[in-house]
Image (cartoon, helix red, strand yellow):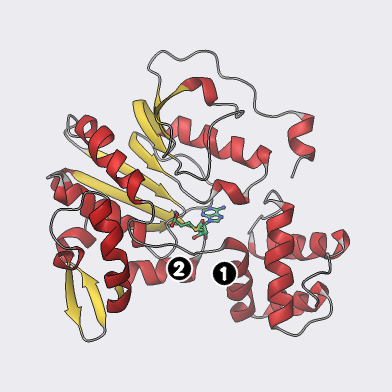
Amino acid sequence: MNAQKTIPEIELHLVLEALRLRHGYDFTQYSRASLQRRLTLLAETRGFDSLLQLLPGILHDDACLDRVIDHVAISITGMFRDPAMYLALRDQVLPYLATYPRIQIWLAGCATGEEACSLAILLKEEGLLAHATVYATDINPAALAMAESGRYPLKKIAQFSRNHQLSGGRGLLLDHFHVEGEQARIHEEIRERIVFSGHNLVSDGVFAETHLIYCANVLIYFNHHLRNRVLNLFRESLVHGGFLCLGNQESLLGTSVEKLFREIDPDSRIYRMRTLRPPVLPFLDEADQEQS
Ligand SMILES: C[S@@+](CC[C@H](N)C(=O)[O-])C[C@H]1O[C@@H](n2cnc3c(N)ncnc32)[C@H](O)[C@@H]1O
């Protein structure tokens, strides 16, 4: 398939329906532009002329299904990926979280776990790890399996070290890992404070009593309606006065929950839920449904 070619809507529809009906993965509310780009690339790498050639694999071959999920879900990540945001969390959010006897953090869309490790390292450096649990969730089972191992290539840790320093990191990033040949394994004390699990933001429910929700580089792949659905899920999961961190690629501007939050850090898009709640705005309308 040619990268310039647009996938006909009927082909896209049939492939998305096969994923939904056969496996329960519902990508129908993902941004059409992103789906077009990612599925065209996948068809190209497999030498297909039409997206429909993916159908037998999606229906009958688990390895093919895994490749499709990997392509559509996009699990690119890194440690301390946005240092300014970690610095803002360190300086402006953790001092509040420190006042709770137990801290619950939900990292939605954790990919292969690098950011879950980063958050747990941040908590350790600020003396809060023993009272905290990081629930790290994703829909991609292959990414979660890598995350659970807690192992990363040693050369990647070296690449992430500068970001760790820029985030206000105390000591060296490598101090938190055991070196095993070419691999680095996160210290057990840190790994055991992270709970990885499958959770689909399209269809699954709330994480109750969460103090901080961190969800960066995920909502950009969703359409307006799905974004509002997920933001409402986050609102319901947070304690009053809880924090929501979206990272510099997304914002609450123009969403159904905008008025329920106060912006704490405009650059890193860190928000705090207002304690007095105005009435919840409806988030479902026909315009939402049509937009992609
Ligand atoms: C680009 S990665 C972002 C990883 C990390 N938050 C970061 O910023 O480095 C997007 C992640 O969102 C996950 N994702 C996509 N759709 C999802 C859904 N419906 N529910 C949960 N996770 C999803 C993907 O599997 C992928 O791991």
Q: Is residue 179 above or below residue 93?
A: below
The residue at which mark 1 appears reads as: 70
Residue 174: where, in percent of width, then height? 18, 68
Residue 216 or 286: which is nearer the viewer? Answer: 216
Q: Is residue 262 visible?
A: yes
Q: Is residue 151 left or right of residue 197?
A: left
Q: Is residue 31 above or below residue 207?
A: below
Q: Is residue 232 left or right of residue 68?
A: left
Q: Residues within 10 Å of mark 1 (few under 14, many from 20)?
A: some
Q: Are marks 2 and 1 in contact (CB under 8 Å)?
A: yes
Which kind of residue does numbered mark 2 sit on? Answer: Ala
Residue 64: where, in percent of width, then height? 64, 79
Which element type, helix, strand or loop, lies under badge 2? helix
- Tag of residue 143: 2
Quarter residue 72 falls in: bottom right
**Of the image marks 2 and 1, the number of the one nearer the N terminus:** 1
Q: Is residue 150 visible?
A: no
